[in-house]
Image (cartoon, rainbow, N blue to C red):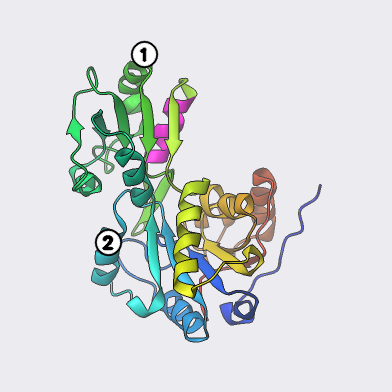
């Protein structure tokens, strides 16, 4: 079946009246981990001022309150959103359901906050009961191939892995940095068992919709929900699986694949969406009211 490619939407204002709830990606849409994007933050705040609810939904491998602190540091106004749900939150829920089991952690020390107050016990790869992958030990220099031997060893022990960040890459300023999803995918290819805690998988969306329902004090109709994001693999695919519309932001992690950042090529977009087997409801270069 041929996909129908939408035209570019220059202003979110034209779409906003169709929706009650926005599930908005964070990295690549409202900041790039170095600076925030004021027009995007303003657009979300304006949507809320007209009665809409905004839940930020992120594959950050850390608790939502840590994400909140980062948003504050980057100058993202709390008036732009009603709440945050992270894949770190989902990961913590899974860990809490496995009391007494020891963890081998793959990831940098900055992610250790994901384990706070969970009373977890860490162990080396040879003795751990399961694995929690939050990222690379050093994502500035390492590649997935650096982990092949370690993952093969974990697979030989048939260890279950929780992937706390299903993203493959994320923007850090103008660079793309590998994320935990690349290691989880490699482990899966080796025959390992993986639970992906974030987008495009259902658990994080269930938590986000529950938070939106709490804010709105009532049930949420999926045909009144819009997902906004810049990743085909996570945001677009996750929206399609959930059964909600998606506004796709082109000036994000796929920007270089689409041609000039300010003038992405429709043919490149069409090819990418066709490969994914789904197309967004609307396309925009950046989130602007």
* Corner quadrant of residue 26: bottom left
The residue nearer to you, when weighing 256 against 42, is 42
- Residue at the spot of label 1: 156
Mark 2 Cα shell of 10 Å, populated few (<14), some (14-19), many (≥20) = some
Closer to the observer: label 1 or label 2?
Answer: 2
* Corner quadrant of residue 215: bottom left
Mark 1 Cα shell of 10 Å, populated few (<14), some (14-19), many (≥20) = few
Q: Position of residue 229 (x, y in %)?
A: 51, 60
Secondary structure at badge 1 equals helix
276 horizontally vs 128: left or right: right
Residue 206 visible in this rendered orientation of the protein: yes
Secondary structure at badge 2 equals helix
Of the numbered discs 1 and 2, the one sitting upstream in the chain is 2
Is 185 magenta? The answer is yes
Please tell me the numbered disc located at residue 65: 2
121 horizontally vs 156: left or right: left
Q: Position of residue 12 (x, y in %)?
A: 57, 77
Identify which residue is drawn at 19% across, 23% down: 124
Q: CA distance from mark 1 to mark 2?
A: 36 Å
What residue occupies the far top of the structure in this picture?
Answer: 156
Q: Position of residue 272 (x, y in %)?
A: 64, 49
Q: Which residues are magenta?
A: 180-188
| 264 in relation to 62, above or below | below
**Numbered circles on residues, count:** 2
The residue nearer to you, when weighing 227 against 266, is 227
The main secondary structure of the magenta stretch is: helix
Q: Position of residue 164 (x, y in %)?
A: 36, 43
The residue nearer to you, when weighing 38 against 94, is 94
């Amino acid at each position: 079946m041929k996909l129908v490619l939408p035209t570019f939407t220059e202003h979110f204002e034209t779409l906003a009246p169709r929706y009650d709830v926005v599930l908005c990606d964070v990295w690549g849409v409202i900041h790039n981990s170095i600076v925030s994007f004021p027009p995007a933050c303003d657009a979300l705040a304006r949507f809320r001022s007209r009665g809409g609810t905004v839940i930020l939904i992120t594959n950050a491998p850390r608790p939502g309150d840590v994400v909140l602190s980062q948003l504050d540091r980057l100058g993202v106004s709390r008036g732009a959103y009603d709440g945050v749900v992270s894949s770190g939150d989902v990961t913590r829920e899974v860990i809490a359901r496995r009391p007494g089991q020891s963890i081998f952690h793959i990831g940098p020390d900055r992610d250790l906050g994901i384990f706070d107050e969970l009373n977890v016990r860490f162990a080396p790869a040879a003795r751990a009961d399961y694995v929690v992958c939050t990222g690379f030990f050093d994502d500035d220099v390492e590649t997935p191939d650096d982990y092949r031997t370690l993952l093969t060893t974990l697979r030989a022990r048939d260890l279950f892995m929780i992937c706390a960040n299903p993203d493959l890459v994320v923007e850090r300023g103008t660079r793309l940095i590998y994320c935990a999803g690349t290691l989880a995918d490699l482990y899966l290819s080796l025959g390992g068992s993986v639970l992906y805690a974030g987008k495009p998988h259902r658990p994080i969306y269930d938590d986000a919709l529950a938070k939106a329902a709490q804010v709105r004090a009532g049930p949420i109709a999926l045909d009144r929900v819009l997902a906004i994001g810049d990743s085909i693999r996570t945001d677009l695919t996750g929206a399609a699986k959930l059964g909600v519309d998606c506004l796709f932001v082109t000036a994000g992690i796929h920007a270089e694949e689409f041609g000039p950042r300010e003038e992405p090529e429709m043919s490149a977009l069409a090819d990418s969406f066709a490969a994914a087997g789904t197309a967004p409801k609307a396309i925009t270069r950046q989130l602007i009211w």
